[in-house]
Image: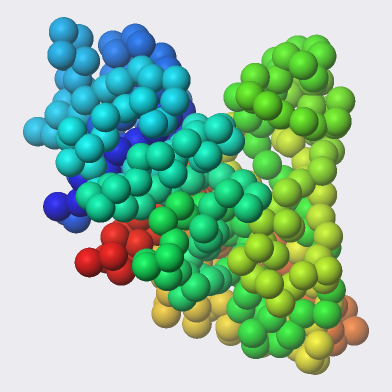
């Protein structure tokens, strides 16, 4: 049994907690979260406005700072830095950092040992990590002997990269543009305010529109999705550009892809490719042709679902596609998959 430590208990951290509760290979043993209210944390894992009530029993042991999920007791700490937790004492083999804080990535190197051999970072920092892995795009680049701090990239890239990798592999990509439609996030304002009120430590955005009312507006912004994709699908460097919209919904993203391919293609050929992939790599790809909306994809554990209704071809080489992905649940499942991958390779 692989013992997992979790640093950060926000949206992604709690999704990972639920997913790990069903794992037979890994057990969540320790969580570090700045919020010291253990009863509130227990409440948040038990009740979720998006994913509903947790179907497993959740008990809080305040005096021991424990949350018990089923029979599994999880010890909680409230340390500011990742390296202030004594992970070794609890026999932790791998730590998932889900805080999004750069300093924790830097400090994660301090916790590595023969026993605690790997750290997974749930965002895409530059140059600090040993590798960035996206399942379905570049997992074969993992070197267990040399790579210990691994990024699982970001939710948009986790969905986009497998699609773009397969398009490039099968038809060749000349160039393309991507528009992502991403639900509002907790760092945004409910009412118009200064960008400085955005509660993301160390942010350096200049998109003043991000300070505007997030529940009434479509907010265009720059995106790091393309940069994150190219980090894992290097053949696409300088071939892609993109923008994003923050939209006033709670969950499930869509991406609109406009891609010029090198080979002549048809709607049938594109659809056949992704139907085949949805059967061969069903944990990554889905394909559907029903007239669905975003919430119909809530809770999908797949990385990406291709909407067959919106596979369009212009002049034989210009492709338009729409894809869907649950930006929390799908991404968190891939974080768990990457954790499993690096630990198996480490054996």
Question: In this rendering, is residue 84 above or below 177?
Answer: above
Which image quadrant: the C terminus? bottom left
Residue 223: image location, x then y, percent:
76, 46
Near-viewer residue (144 or 60): 144
State the image coordinates of residue 214 (x, y, percent, origin top left).
73, 24
State the residue at coordinates (76%, 63%): 257
Position of residue 11 in the picture relative to residue 85 (left or right): right
**Residue at 35% of width from left, 36% of height from top?**
6
Residue 130 appears anywhere in the view: yes
Q: Which image quadrant for residue 195?
A: top right
Q: Is residue 80 left or right of residue 224?
A: left
Q: Residue at x 83, y 69 (%)?
A: 238
**Foreground residue among 33 and 337:** 33
Residue at (73% x, 49% y) in the render: 224
Q: Is residue 176 visible?
A: no
Q: Residue furthest bottom?
A: 264
């Amino acid at each position: 049994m692989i013992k997992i430590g979790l640093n950060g208990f926000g949206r992604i951290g709690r999704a990972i907690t639920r997913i790990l509760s069903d794992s037979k290979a890994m057990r969540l043993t320790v969580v570090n979260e700045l919020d010291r209210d253990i009863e509130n944390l227990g409440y948040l894992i038990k009740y979720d406005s998006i994913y509903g009530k947790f179907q497993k029993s959740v008990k809080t042991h305040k005096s021991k700072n424990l949350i018990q999920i089923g029979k599994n007791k999880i010890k909680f700490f409230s340390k500011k830095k990742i390296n202030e937790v004594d992970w070794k004492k609890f026999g932790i083999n791998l730590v998932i950092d889900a805080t999004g804080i750069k300093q924790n990535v830097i400090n994660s190197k301090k916790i590595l040992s023969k026993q605690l051999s790997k750290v997974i970072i749930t965002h895409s920092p530059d140059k600090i990590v040993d590798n960035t892995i996206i399942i379905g795009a570049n997992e074969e680049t993992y070197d267990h002997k040399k790579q210990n701090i691994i990024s699982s990239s970001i939710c948009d890239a986790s969905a986009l990269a497998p699609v773009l990798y397969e398009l490039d592999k099968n038809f060749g990509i000349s160039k393309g543009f991507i528009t992502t439609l991403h639900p509002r996030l907790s760092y945004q304002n409910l009412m118009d305010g200064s960008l400085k009120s955005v509660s993301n430590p160390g942010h350096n955005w200049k998109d003043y529109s991000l300070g505007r009312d997030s529940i009434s507006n479509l907010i265009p912004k720059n995106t790091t999705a393309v940069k994150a994709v190219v980090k894992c699908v290097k053949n696409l460097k300088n071939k892609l550009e993109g923008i994003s919209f923050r939209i006033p919904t709670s969950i499930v993203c869509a991406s609109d892809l406009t891609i010029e391919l090198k080979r002549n293609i048809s709607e049938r050929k594109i659809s056949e490719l992704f139907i085949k992939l949805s059967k061969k790599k069903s944990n990554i790809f889905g394909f559907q042709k029903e007239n669905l909306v975003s919430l119909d994809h809530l809770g999908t554990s797949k990385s990406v679902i291709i909407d067959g209704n919106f596979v369009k071809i212009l002049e034989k080489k210009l492709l338009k596609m729409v894809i869907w992905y649950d930006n929390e649940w799908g991404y968190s499942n891939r974080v768990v998959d990457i954790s499993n991958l690096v630990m198996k390779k480490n054996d």
